[in-house]
Amino acid sequence: MEFSTMRFRKSTTALALFAALGSLTVTPASAQSPSCTHIVGMVVSLTGAAGRYGQAASKSVELVFGELNKAAGVQGIAGCKLGFDVRDAQSQGSVGVDQARQLVDLTKVPAIIGGIISSVTIPIVTSVTGPAGVVQISPASSSPSLTKLAADGKTNGWFFRTITSDALQGTAAAKYALDQGMKSLTIIYVNNDFGVNMVSEFRRAYEALGGKVIDVTPYNPEQSSYNAEVTKALKTDPPALYFIGYPGDGTTIVRTWIQQGGPQKFLLNDGMNAADFIKGVGPQFLANAYGTSSGSTPTPSTTFFASAYSAMSGSFDAGAPAADRAFDAGAILGLAIAQAGKFEASAIRDAIRKVTAPGGEVVYAGPQGFARAMQLIREKKPVRYVGVIGPVEFDQNGDIAGPFRTWKISNGEVATVGQMSAEEVQAVQAKLPK
């Protein structure tokens, strides 16, 4: 089934449609484009705990591929226009692996965008893309385990991500919590690779900096009730809650916390700066809710994305979790395909670093920027894409370093209150016990 446009909405009808279809092949329309299509795989969660992340990310890739196709014109990108086959991982690792296998074994894609959450991304890279020699680029999986897998040679150099590792975010969150006067707190966290690693990194920094973790309670996603977990966490009479998880579960857990009389002071992880979460809990209960997210360095790409994404994305705005990083993941991958000159995995992998390396002419997202990028690539001149999240460069493990945004919820809106540079976070880490 092929679509030139898609709309993602919050309705259960739309989500049921995604689940029923299983996959959607999206070929962003272009006035003048080649007749052939290079299909990139995309495995994200359209349903389940991380469904809103995947829906927002899919709209971002639709937008950026459409812009790249327009910029490439009749010559195309490596001779064809770009499209993508999006599959629903349902926020489950086993489902994500099955969908990735279909894309690699049957569709023969040389590259996959995804997954969204680390518990889906990790099994895909270790059992599908790494062994098969297929490029994988995740816009939202932040687990430090992915760095270790790469360092141990288990990703075989095929994995990249456009989000910073929680090894840095845990430190940023610890410092921010103490800056807000949270000298002690309890933690409720999602019991998967993301949650376990985030707790570990946060706790190491928080306690070294003088904070006290009173209690730690894991939860399993998508339960109908979290009364038992909240009751356990409240037994120690904590002054604040650090919730580490996803907006859907988070809404239920924080509402239960409030209903049971828990203090209305919260620290939240990246991704919880979601309108659905704020509305579901009630903004009046979140006046003392603070959080950290991977930040960005504003660029002309940021300005373009803020305008263009909101105009085409239906119920999402440019601040939707994973949206900006998915756009950059799609842009980097599309430019790498153009740079490679062929739709072949190893050539694309090598070109990813070329189109983000310092030294090339800087190009930004948008019609003029992408058109200039295509011209430079055709002239065999170096290009450096500086995206929505700023200038990124991948290290040997496929990681990026970047700033962190500190925010609070004010009058029902997420308000940025500051930014911590990667250098500032690393300076704090350097003082921590090994």
Image (tube, grey):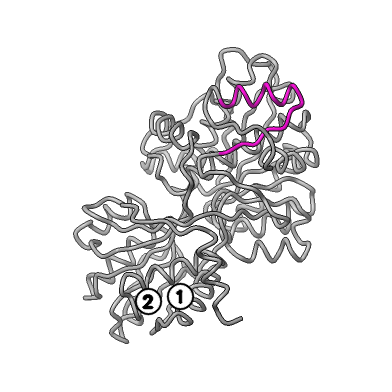
The residue positioned 38% from the left and 44% from the top of the image is: 12
Badge 2 marks a residue whose secondary structure is helix
Q: In the image, is 104 to the left or to the right of 240?
A: right
Nearer the N terminus, badge 2 or badge 1? 1
Res. 392 visible in picture: yes
202 or 433, which lies in front? 433
Q: Which mark is residue 190?
A: none
Q: Secondary structure at mark 1?
A: strand
Label ID, residue 218: 1
Asked if residue 247 shows in the view, the reply is no
CB under 8 Å between discs 2 and 1: yes
Q: Which mark is residue 229?
A: 2
Towards the viewer: 253 or 71: 71
Q: Is residue 210 left or right of residue 364?
A: left
Is residue 366 placed above or below 95 in the rendered structure?
above
Task: In the rendered view, tell whether residue 225 sits above or below residue 330.
Answer: below
Dot 1: few (<14), some (14–19), or many (≥20) neighbours within 10 Å? some
- Residue 98 on image: x %, y %: 66, 51
Q: Residue furthest left?
A: 284
Q: Position of residue 109 (x, y in %)?
A: 72, 38
List x then y, in percent, for residue 329: 59, 42
- Quarter in which the C terminus is drawn: bottom right
Which contiguous range is marked in magenta? 369-386
Q: Amino acid at mark 2?
A: Glu
Location of residue 262 with respect to 224 vertically, above or below: below
Q: Quadrant location of the N terminus?
A: top right
> Based on the displayed image, in which of its 4 quarters is residue 104 positioned?
top right
